[in-house]
Amino acid sequence: MSAYKRVQQWSTFGRMWYLYDAKWQNPLHSANKIKHYLTGTHKPIYHPLSDCGDHVVVINARDIALPGNEWEKRVYFHHTGYPGGATWTLAWELHQKDPTMIIRKAVYNQLDKNLLRRGRMEKLHLFADDQIPESILQNVSSQLTQLRPTPTRLDHYTEEERLQFPKVFDWPKEHVIR
């Protein structure tokens, strides 16, 4: 086997580490994208009965964005296994307790319901902010693109960029706010 074939085979069968920034992303849509990398469906050697998925490191889980009024309407269910142990928690309460739990539950529900699901969830690494331990950061080799671009805050634009921005209406000079 040539050296090129060995490298090609290693990159096919080796586990890659991907970085995904969840800032201003819908966790339900992000979970669908993360699922493809955890299961390995993006690889040519994918088989549903084999665990050939990659590691995914998700940062900024605290800054996710749910659409509309889903913070107040979406409910997460948990049962302890004992009689009367059912609890329903609103999304904003769950996010306040653990900022990574909404993405964890979204990815868990997206994965196939089989015996490989727990092993695939172990390859998901979630962080509430962008502070990643060096032991994990040194393994990251690639970054996944965000599903929607992160908007820039208005106070992060320079004065030149604000003045050059196209105007919808041509206001009189006395009404311009500086």
Image (cartoon, rainbow, N blue to C red):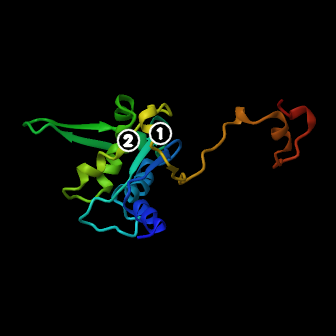
Say whether residue 167 is left or right of residue 100. Answer: right
Q: Label 2: state its secondary structure.
A: strand
Frontmost residue, 7 versus 66: 7
Q: Would you call the spot at circle 2 few (<14 residues within 10 Å), some (14-19), or many (20 or more)?
A: some
- Whether label 2 touches label 1, CB < 8 Å: no
Q: Is residue 60 left or right of residue 171?
A: left
Residue lying at 46% horizontally and 32% vertically, measured from the top left: 134
Q: Secondary structure at mark 1?
A: loop
Q: Residue at the spot x=56%, y=52% of the render? A: 148
User: Left or right: 36 with respect to 167?
Assistant: left
Where residue 168 sits in the image (x, y, percent)? Answer: 81, 49
Residue 72 found in image quarter: top left
Q: Please tell me how many numbered marks the rendered image carries.
A: 2
Q: Quadrant of the N terminus?
A: bottom left
Q: Nearer the viewer, residue 89 or 46?
A: 46
Relative to 22, residue 9 above or below: below
Residue 97, visible in the rendered structure: yes
Q: Nearer the viewer, mark 2 or mark 1?
A: 1
Residue toward you, 149 or 42: 42
In the picture shown, does residue 158 fall above or below 146? above
Q: Position of residue 85 (x, y in %)?
A: 13, 35
The amino acid sitting under disc 1 is Gln
Residue at image mark 2: 125
Q: Position of residue 76 (x, y in %)?
A: 29, 42
Residue beneath disc 1: 138
- First in sequence: mark 2 or mark 1? 2
| Quarter of the image where the C terminus is located | top right
Three-letter amino acid code at disc 2? His
